[in-house]
Image (tube, rainbow, N blue to C red):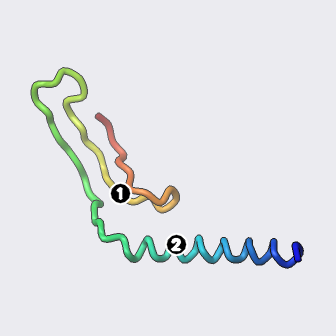
Amino acid sequence: MLALGIPFGVAANALYQYLRGVISRRMDPISLAGQWGELISGIDERRCSIGEIRYDLRRRMWVFDGTN
């Protein structure tokens, strides 16, 4: 039973991860890709933010690449 359960579990997990990735890429309603910039007045530290917002497929999340 164990000899059949391990390959089945590995295959089921691979199928689940594949389907999860396909669904998340196709069903993600947020379109955030682009550039970002802001200036906050009246604060001494970190007054400016500038960077790029994009979806990182490797980490499966939206990331902000830039600086404060």
First in sequence: mark 2 vs mark 1: 2
Image disc number at residue 54: 1
Camera-side residue of 60 and 33: 60
Element at label 1? strand
Query: Could you tell whether 37 is left or right of 8 in the image?
Result: left
Q: Report the residue that reaches farthest toward the top.
A: 44
For label 1, the crowd category at 10 Å Cα-Cα, with few meaning under 14, some 14 to 19 and many 20 or more, is some
Q: Which mark identifies residue 33? A: none
User: Disc 2 designates what residue?
Assistant: 20
Assign a secondary structure to mark 2: helix
**Residue 68's spot in the image, x, y percent?**
29, 34
Direction from residue 20 to residue 68 in the image, left or right: left
Residue pictured at 29% horizontal, 60% vertical: 33
* Nearer to us: label 2 or label 1: 2
Front position in the image: 59 or 17:
17
Which residue corresponds to the image point at 49% horizontal and 76% vertical from the top-left?
A: 22
Q: Which sits in the foreground, 9 or 31? A: 9
Label 2, label 1: how far apart the Cα atoms are = 20 Å
